[in-house]
Image: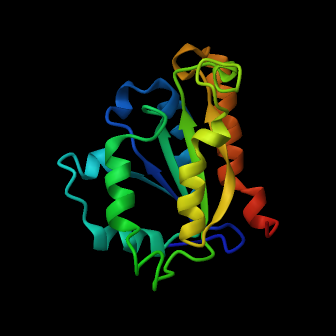
Amino acid sequence: MSFDHPSLPRILIILVHPDPKQSVANKALLQFTHSLPHVTVHDLYAHYPDFFIDVTRERALLAAHDVIVFQHPMYMYSCPALLKEWLDRVLSKDYAHGEGSALAGKWWRSVITTGGAEQAFSEQGYNRYGIEEILRPFELIADLCQMHWISPMVVYWARRLSQAELAEKAIEYHQWLHAPKEVLNGR
């Protein structure tokens, strides 16, 4: 992997959306990534439509990057099925945890799109829990793998946002990808 800018960490975006061409929000978020040479976008459904994951290939991608971004819609208070399969197979015991520590010191960030409004994700809201509680299993996986957890980016009510609001989110994401403050500041 070519890495031209020594001060920027290598970032792997693992995109997990069964139909990314129909996802207005995920397309908007990814629109600027092609201009960032230290960022790799890896579309799991494009590579594994049959769910037969090449574990060796996936681990090589993880080894080549410093920051792993899991970008996906929230499905049933979790992630799409292929990401769950990927987590179970790729981050297995004695590779990423247990006797293994291949991901120790790397960074994890979840970038989530939801169909619900932000106020729905609260104790008083429709979902009865905040997004932090709902995403806790991912934070626990990161911790199990000795990875640093970066606060997630959540795009609420993704299908109902205006083009201007989506553009703002895309710019925010691009700025973070260009200079992820938590990583560069040694958080």
Task: Determine whether 158 is above or below 78 in the image.
Answer: above
- Name the spot of residue 170 as percent of width and height, x first: 63, 34
Visible in this render: residue 119? yes
Q: Looking at the image, which is closer to me, 150 or 32?
A: 150
Judged left or right of residue 116, residue 8 is right
Type of colouring: rainbow
Residue at figure coordinates x 61%, y 53% from the top left: 109
Q: How many labels, in total?
A: 0
Quadrant of image for the N terminus: bottom left
User: Which residue is outermost to the bottom?
Assistant: 99
Judged left or right of residue 73, residue 123 is right
Visible in this render: residue 1? no
Residue at figure coordinates x 62%, y 14% from the top left: 162
- Name the spot of residue 94 as percent of width and height, x first: 40, 81
Quadrant of image for the C terminus: bottom right
Question: Toward which corner of the image does residue 21 lie, by quadrant?
Answer: top left
User: Which residue is outermost to the right?
Assistant: 185
Residue at figure coordinates x 61%, y 25% from the top left: 156
- Name the spot of residue 102 as percent of width and height, x first: 49, 80
Q: Looking at the image, which is closer to me, 31 or 105?
A: 105
Q: Looking at the image, which is closer to me, 47 or 106?
A: 106
- Name the spot of residue 14 as percent of width and height, x first: 45, 52
Residue at figure coordinates x 38%, y 38% from the top left: 17
Task: Determine whether 91 is above or below 168 in the image.
Answer: below
Task: Determine whether 51 is above or below 74 in the image.
Answer: below
